[in-house]
Image (tube, rainbow, N blue to C red):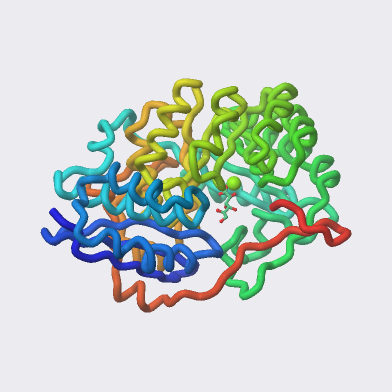
Amino acid sequence: MKIVDAQVVVTSPGRNFVTLRITTDEGLTGLGDATLNGRELAVSSYLVDHVVPLLIGRDPHRIEDTWQYLYRGAYWRRGPVTMAAIAAVDVALWDIKAKAAGLPLYQLLGGASRDRVRAYGHASGRDIPELFDSIRARQAEGYQAIRVQTGVPGLTNVYGVRHGAAPAEGADRHPRPVVEDWDTAAYLRHIPGVLEAVRNEFGPELPLLHDAHHRLTPIQAARLGAALEPYDLFWLEDCTPAENQEGLRLVRQHTRTPLAIGEVFNTVFDYQTLVNEQLIDYVRSAVTHFGGVTPLRKLFDYAAQYQIRSAVHGPEDISPVGMAAAIHLDLAIHNFGIQEYSGHTAATDEVFRHAYTFTDGHLHPGEEPGIGVELDDALAAAHPYEAAYLPVNRLADGTVHDW
Ligand code: CS2
Ligand code: MG
């Protein structure tokens, strides 16, 4: 079999998605997600201008070799644009291989290690009553594990918190980045009381997660983790910008709250100290941003040696193609932890018809050969790209802060 064509489709059914479709001389096609929120066209260009010409004529079955060829061969390694582009190729090739075998992808990854995949959803509120309503809404949808984000008194615009009908994070199509505001001291004073209220209202059994979104220093994170221990979090996510991996030693010494990190990481090297020293409990990378199924499977196997589990990043900006690939991997690996799942707009689900299902808070990839996603080109074309930025974050004095 040979690759005869590869196209990049950029569509915006509510938000932008970048999809690679690889076609073979036998008529089989495969899809890969290359969406990098707020920088979509950079990945599209990387694929169209630099990668697609290299794919034509290659044997689509040689997934590992193609991955190494694109990663090592480029010389300029790592980075989100490169790794999202390689991920799209990798997933599209797995899709083709599984279709050629007539099997759903998870069967090629060793078969199911579980019957279904537990997902967590997002709840948020500007205040506690609004947050309670949001948690109840997620429970009504079936979620059995919930991430809680809350407004902070004195701050008007906080990451992850829904303002009225507006989307909570990143989906706004702003032609310039929205400026959010931040005050770490106010956040640290406020958040333990919120989690106490949620725990009291919803009881001891509901798994609760919280995302600090890279905003704390190691000592602030250590203090927060310790303060949250009575509320038994499933995890505290991205407590620091963890490219300073050694900083997690300090956090770990001071708290038994489980830690999850990695949604912005794109290679195993970003995790070495965190995993080798068992400084975290969950690795958070997405198939789409980590170079695909091939390297993410290796990361999970490496993490398993340290009793660290998977928790694949699954916000709305991972397309249904990236989500499907994640769910196949989740079903197959032994050290699965949990899958983030925000769902998509109805328009997105029409553009990307998918076999995976969400029932009673759990996902299943379905039994269609391949990853089980089809892209409707005509519908995709009806939703052209729209420039959109993620927000930026500033302190009260105007200093740009992590977000
Ligand atoms: C978030 C993301 O899902 C999460 O945990 O941190 O929503 C993140 O902000 C977006 O994916 C950025 O594109
Ligand atoms: Mg996060």
Reply above or below: 223 against 292.
above
Left or right relative to 312: residue 297: left
Residue 9, located in which quarter of the rendered image? bottom left
Q: How many marks are shown on the rendered structure?
A: 0
Q: Residue at x 76, y 39 (%)?
A: 217
Left or right relative to 324: residue 306: right
x, y (%) of residue 235?
61, 33
Reply above or below: 238 against 173.
above
Residue closest to the eye, 348 or 56: 56
Residue closest to the eye, 342 or 292: 292
x, y (%) of residue 310?
47, 34
- Any part of residue 346 in sight: no
Reply above or below: 100 against 6.
above
- Any part of residue 52 in sight: yes
Residue 387, located in which quarter of the rendered image? bottom right
x, y (%) of residue 177?
67, 68
x, y (%) of residue 332?
32, 33
Residue closest to the eye, 376 or 40: 40
Q: Residue at x 46, y 55 (%)?
A: 82
Hey, which residue is sitting farthest right in the picture? 397
Left or right relative to 385: residue 369: left
Residue 185, located in which quarter of the rendered image? top right
Q: Residue at x 73, y 46 (%)?
A: 215
Reply above or below: 7 against 143.
below
Q: Residue at x 56, y 50 (%)?
A: 137
